[in-house]
Amino acid sequence: MPDRMPMSPAEFDAAVRRFEQRFAGTMHQTSGTRSIKGNADAKGHEFSKHLYGMAADYILTTPNVVAHNSMMRFAARLGFWVKRYDWGIHLQGLPTGPIPYWWWVKYGEGHAAEKVGAEHLGELVRSDAV
Ligand SMILES: [Zn+2]
């Protein structure tokens, strides 16, 4: 069970802006929204949230453990799901794994991953019977 709700695209964009303002000049973005081909070229995960415009990657201009730790803490406080890499940080506004079906219906349209198969979606259950 996720311990919190996925972000909406607007919440994700707002949190990214706060993150970028906080660390302006000390890092730069290396990846954002990806096409299916772009994700494959980047060797991104099949379920990558970059496919939904819900992930961003940053590298530190000058590698520095203290700054890296500070970025990790600030990103977690903003509500991101965070992954640390040697080269920097990956932020996403959705939990890892399949996309919540309700989220995909509400926000998924227009993204590359709109075309993905049902295996990318969690909770793929019709609720007609309720
Ligand atoms: Zn990433």
Image (spheres, rainbow, N blue to C red):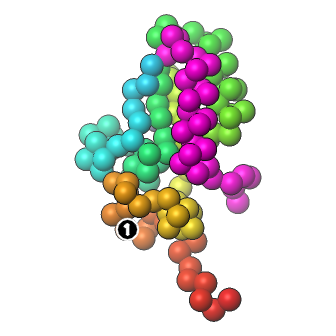
| Image position of 83 (left or right of 34) | right
Q: Please tell me which residue is depicted at 39% across the width and 32% down the height of the picture.
A: 31
- Quadrant (top left, top right, bottom left, bottom right) of the N terminus: bottom right
Q: Please tell me which residue is depicted at 53% across the width and 28% down the height of the picture.
A: 89
- Quarter assignment of residue 11: top right
Q: Please tell me which residue is depicted at 53% across the width and 75% down the height of the picture.
A: 124
As rendered, which of 64 and 22 lies closer to the eye?
A: 22
Q: Please tell me which residue is depicted at 47% across the width and 35% down the height of the picture.
A: 56
Q: Position of residue 27 (x, y in %)?
A: 49, 16
Query: What segment carries the magenta color?
Result: 1-27
Query: Is 80 situated above or below 106?
Result: above
As rendered, which of 113 and 109 lies closer to the eye?
A: 109
As rendered, which of 35 and 88 lies closer to the eye?
A: 35
| Image position of 39 (left or right of 119) | left
Ligand 1 in which quarter? top left
Identify the secondary structure beneath mark 1: loop
- Neighbour tally class for label 1: few under 14, some 14-19, many 20 plus, Cα within 10 Å: few
- Quadrant (top left, top right, bottom left, bottom right) of the C terminus: bottom right
- Quarter assignment of residue 43: top left
Going by the numbered disc 1, the residue's amino acid type is: Gly
Query: Is 76 situated above or below 107?
Result: above
Residue where numbered disc 1 is placed? 117
The residue at the far bottom in this view is: 129
Residue 80 visible in the displayed image: yes
Q: Position of residue 99 (x, y in %)?
A: 52, 60
Q: Position of residue 44 (x, y in %)?
A: 38, 43
